[in-house]
Image (cartoon, rainbow, N blue to C red):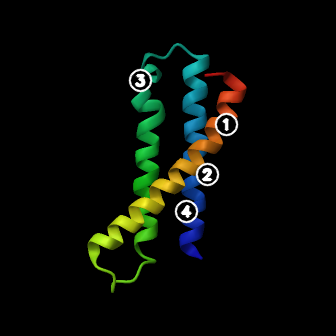
Amino acid sequence: MKVLLKILVIGIIYGFFGYFLYRGRVLTENKLLEYDFIVFFAPAILATLANMFALWSILSDKINSFARFGLVFVLSLGLAVLVAMIYFTVAFNLYGT
């Protein structure tokens, strides 16, 4: 249950952070927000890493480390993509692309 709560909190933080970065990119003239890496990729990478740390503990130690890492990475990346799709939908509909 704690892991699900951590994943939920990570997703909410990532969604709000990504939304406000995109909002800032559209509404302000901040030079830092002109870089795609800062607005889109850096938050996604950080969310994926945070999800990996949260999910690592729920998998059994009996699975070999390569398979465990691969499964955790795929699940974490999937969660980050899901949250990104949700906040992209909201942000793009409000502010355009």
Q: Are marks 3 and 1 in contact (CB under 8 Å)?
A: no
Up/down of 71 relative to 96, above or below:
below
Residue pictured at 39% horizontal, 60% vertical: 73
Count of numbered labels shown in the rendering = 4
Q: Are marks 4 and 3 in contact (CB under 8 Å)?
A: no
Q: In the rendering, which numbered label is found on residue 7?
A: 4
Q: Which amino acid does the dot numbered 2 rest on? A: Ile
Residue position for label 1: 89
Helix, strand or loop at mark 2 = helix
Q: What percent of the width, then of the height, locates residue 5?
A: 60, 67
Q: Which amino acid does the dot numbered 4 rest on? A: Ile
Q: What percent of the width, then of the height, locates residue 77?
A: 46, 54
Residue position for label 3: 35
Q: Are marks 4 and 1 in contact (CB under 8 Å)?
A: no
Report the side of 68 relative to 15 (left or right): left
Residue pictured at 71% horizontal, 28% vertical: 93
The quadrant in which residue 9 appears is bottom right
Question: Closer to the observer: label 1 or label 2?
Answer: 1
Q: Which amino acid does the dot numbered 1 rest on? A: Thr
Residue pictured at 27% horizontal, 70% vertical: 66
Identify the image quadrant of the N terminus. Answer: bottom right
For marks 2 and 4, the one nearer the N-term is 4
For marks 3 and 1, the one nearer the N-term is 3
Residue position for label 2: 12
Question: In the depicted view, which residue is nearer to us: 58 or 27?
Answer: 58
